[in-house]
Image (spheres, rainbow, N blue to C red):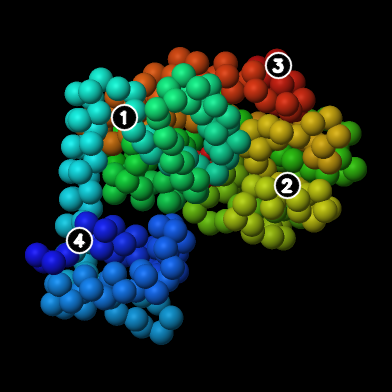
Amino acid sequence: MKNATLHQLRVFEAVARHSSFTRAAEELFLTQPTVSMQVKQLSKAVGMPLFEQVGKRLFLTEAGKELYQTCREVFERMSQFETAIANLKGLKQGTLRLAVVTTAKYVIPRLMGPFCQRYPGVDVSITVTNHERIVESIAENRDDLYILSEPPEDIDVAVHPFLENPLVVLANRNHPLAQEKNIPLKRLTEEQFIMREPGSGTRRSVQSLFEEQGLELKVKLDLGSNEAIKQAIAGGLGISVLSIHTLALEGKDSPLVILDAENFPIEKMWYIVYPAGKQLSIIAQTFFDYLTTEGKAVAEKTTASDGFLDYAKKH
Ligand code: PGA
């Protein structure tokens, strides 16, 4: 391994994490031939192949798995070292790494505005993905802080609520149910439903509500994006249940309305989470304090959504 470089290890780690040369190249802003070349040279330094291709899929070899684990430990130590140095310097400077569920992307980037103005030395990296992927990231300790609605039960984590995340039924403004009050849950099962993808926390909450009532939904379409679901509702494909925050930038002329349905909203909270015992960097700790003390007020101040504001007034 004498000839292996840190850069090669970073490239290898990204390929292994994505199981893809192409996605690693995208993440690292490199070309795919460069990525392949780096991995090839690393594999030469190790003296064994690191990946094997079966059909179209890329798998780690045993040597690759060992190296992947080693890389993660090395990078974790490096990041602790960087944190220690930044903390020694006493500077609020460095990178804050967040991973947030897709619904939180309507709030967290807006909250970053005032935070970054206050601490101009801080760079931010935000990964937006679904519940299942966030839980994987927590287990692998990939980021500084995580935001999601249902903290994992099988991982030891520190958990702090910071903002309500009600899930509401959304329909097209012209939908016949738009004018009705207190729509029974059973009535919703007659409508065509648009659902988030498996692995989504929103999907899980919707499924458990209907299952608890012994009701089955007519799912017309699974979509892996809240925005795509909003477009599908606007296009008249059906109704859906999403976080009210997905309406954050919908103005008065929005084609979407919140239905007045029984058992809704599903009252959820967003939590800021990190693995128990993790030593937070000064930056992460500062962001944590900001979110738990000012997050809610800033989120409400910066939304343009009537639906959201009406809801906030009533609750
Ligand atoms: P998701 O978010 O549907 O994007 O997985 C769920 C959550 O709020 O935890």
Q: Residues within 10 Å of mark 1 (few under 14, many from 20)?
A: some
| Residue at mark 1 | 158
Is residue 191 depicted above or below 49 in this figure? Answer: above
Whichever of callouts 3 and 4 sits on the residue coming sooner in the sequence is 4
Whichever of callouts 3 and 1 sits on the residue coming sooner in the sequence is 1
Type of amino acid at the residue the image marks with label 1: Ala
Task: Work out whether residue 143 can be spotted.
Answer: yes
Type of amino acid at the residue the image marks with label 3: Lys
Rendered image quadrant of residue 87: top left
Is residue 229 depicted above or below 124 in this figure? Answer: below
SS type, badge 3: helix
Whichever of callouts 1 and 4 sits on the residue coming sooner in the sequence is 4
Q: How many angstroms separate mark 3 from mark 1 (CA)?
A: 31 Å
Disc number for residue 5: 4
Q: How many angstroms separate mark 3 from mark 2 (CA)?
A: 24 Å
Q: Residue at x 54, y 26 (%)?
A: 113
| Residue at mark 3 | 314
Q: Residues within 10 Å of mark 3 (few under 14, many from 20)?
A: few
Q: Residues within 10 Å of mark 4 (few under 14, many from 20)?
A: few
Q: How many angstroms separate mark 2 from mark 4 (CA)?
A: 46 Å
Is residue 269 depicted above or below 49 in this figure? Answer: above
Disc number for residue 230: 2
Disc number for residue 135: none
Q: How many angstroms separate mark 1 from mark 4 (CA)?
A: 35 Å
Whichever of callouts 3 and 2 sits on the residue coming sooner in the sequence is 2
Q: Residue at x 46, y 41 (%)?
A: 126
The C terminus appears in which quarter of the rendering? Answer: top right
The x and y percentages for residue 276 are 25, 32
Type of amino acid at the residue the image marks with label 4: Thr
Rendered image quadrant of residue 11: bottom left
The x and y percentages for residue 274 are 33, 34
